Amino acid sequence: MFRLVFLVFLCQSVAGRRNVLFLVADDMRPDIEAFGQADGIVRPKMHTPNLDRLAGRSLLLKQAHVQQALCGPSRTSLLTSRRPDTTRVYDCKTYWRSSGGNFTTLPQYFKENGYRTIGVGKIYHGGKASNNNDPMSWTDPYLDSPDKYKKDKLLMNAVSQKRLDKQPLQDTLIADQAIEVLRDAAPKAKAGKQPFFLAVGFRKPHIPWTFPDRFLKHYPLEDIPIPDNYYASPDMSKIAWHTYRNMGNFKDVKAYKLTGVGSFNFTFPPMLTRRLRQAYYSAVTATDFELGRVISELDRLGLSKDTVISFWGDHGWQLGEHAEWQKQTNFDLSTHAPMMLSIPGKTDRGIVSEELVEFVDLFPTLVDAVGIPKLKTCPQSSKKVRLCTEGTSFLSLVDNPKQWLKNAVFSQYPSQVKGLMGYTLRTKRHRYTEWVPFVGKSRNSRRPMFGKVKTAELYDHQVDPAENVNLAYKQSMKNLRQRLKMKLRKGWRAATRQ
């Protein structure tokens, strides 16, 4: 009897609630046209018409930062609303339910509140890192598609239409699946019987860059710029460096017969750099195309007015700046990623905010946007607390996009120098990073030793947006560094508006 009453109550409580279309891109930095010319980024004019249109009806967050610039940790933090030192996920192999705690995820919470939750493509990092896409999160069997082009072993793979007709791209298949799910979920959603939470994770622009060759026309090689900071600055520590040797394993890169790929301050020849950048941006446009197909179907089905749409890229990506490629650093180009939120009736004309937000903020924001019970802030120790947030809802930015919610955001990354963790703080003007010993007998006991800083970085974005000049050891910056050091060590709680 109690179960029947509960189910009736649950059905009544979800009736009329808005759906959620949860869109994700892999390795997409915030270079899309809607963001304008991002500070310190040299890029061609982007062709992203669908993301630009979505931005025009969204809260566009120009300063959204990830908790760690790697797929597994970043996605885990966003989907649990906990930071890496809570989830204990620093790589793409560790499952937070085993390492950090049995934390309730974003789609799981919507599921517990009566939503039909469906995952398509890459939402979590797959395999061991999520126990195969975290079955607890979904009401429906998880959907994904194989990469039929993997055997080509090309980093830059522009595919002809003739071949695409026979062998669709992985992201095309993911979009096809998402469209089928929308069609299946639409009747109940439109009738107000069961809202849906549909998560669609596109695989690009992650390497290898496989895309329809028709998108190359948007990025002529002669229009692709070489980064101004083509080499690492003289005061850049190797501790802050990330190697990208795996990029040298693809057949088309091997053909250049280069030595030292991924070693400190190695950089690709200018023409190859242009080709690599061209391929990355073409893959971004391909992602935009597939994402546009899904949004168009949502519109065609008459679901747009009742559906909140979120879009985010899981972290940034370096395209030769500082002689760096990929992510896996604490530079702004790695931690800064695109994020936008469309709420029908509230963001229809487009709202732009340059206030600092973090990826751990999206979970409580989506909860507030649809009106299910709010999340409480996590206590200092939350290993045994299944549901809470280490973020802050940014829904209030819809009404006041200039309202500051936090005066700093926080990221971290383990150095390739064993036993060191880089903790970084970003204010509106500065980025300050300390690389410190990260020690303990087990994963769960490791702690930062801030009293034994190995090296530090300090960049002033007002005069050096590309983060080329490390000011940490300048005598004139001593007082500023001390203030930022204290802010870093006090952490996110002290930086958040109470």
Image: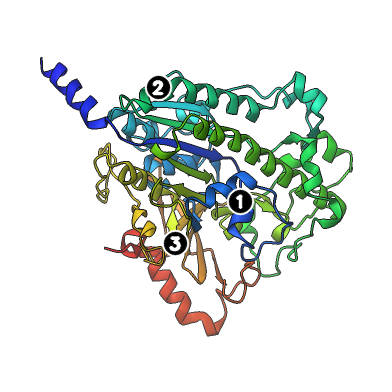
Q: Give the Cα distance between marks 2 and 1.
A: 36 Å
Location of residue 482 by image quarter = bottom left
**Residue found 67% across the figure and 43% down from its top:** 284
Circle 2 or circle 3, nearest the eye: 2
* Residue 494 is at least partly visible in this image: yes
Circle 2 or circle 1, nearest the eye: 2
Q: Which residue is mark 2?
A: 187
Q: Earlier in the sequence, mark 2 or mark 3?
A: 2
* Label 3 with label 1: CB-CB less than 8 Å: no
**Residue found 41% across the figure and 75% down from its top:** 483
Along the line of sight, the residue nearer the viewer: 243 or 135: 135
Q: Secondary structure at mark 2?
A: helix
Q: Which residue is mark 3?
A: 356
Q: Amino acid at mark 1?
A: Arg
Q: Amino acid at mark 2?
A: Pro
Query: In the rendering, at what x and y percent does residue 52 appear?
Result: 59, 50
Specify the farthest residue to the left: 1
Q: How is the image coloured?
A: rainbow
**Mark number displayed over residue 169:** none
* Residue 132 is at least partly visible in this image: no
Q: Secondary structure at mark 3?
A: strand
Q: Is residue 492 left or right of residue 177?
A: left
Q: Amino acid at mark 3?
A: Leu
Q: Which residue is mark 1?
A: 29
**Residue found 58% across the figure and 46% down from its top:** 51
Q: Give the Cα distance between marks 3 and 1.
A: 16 Å
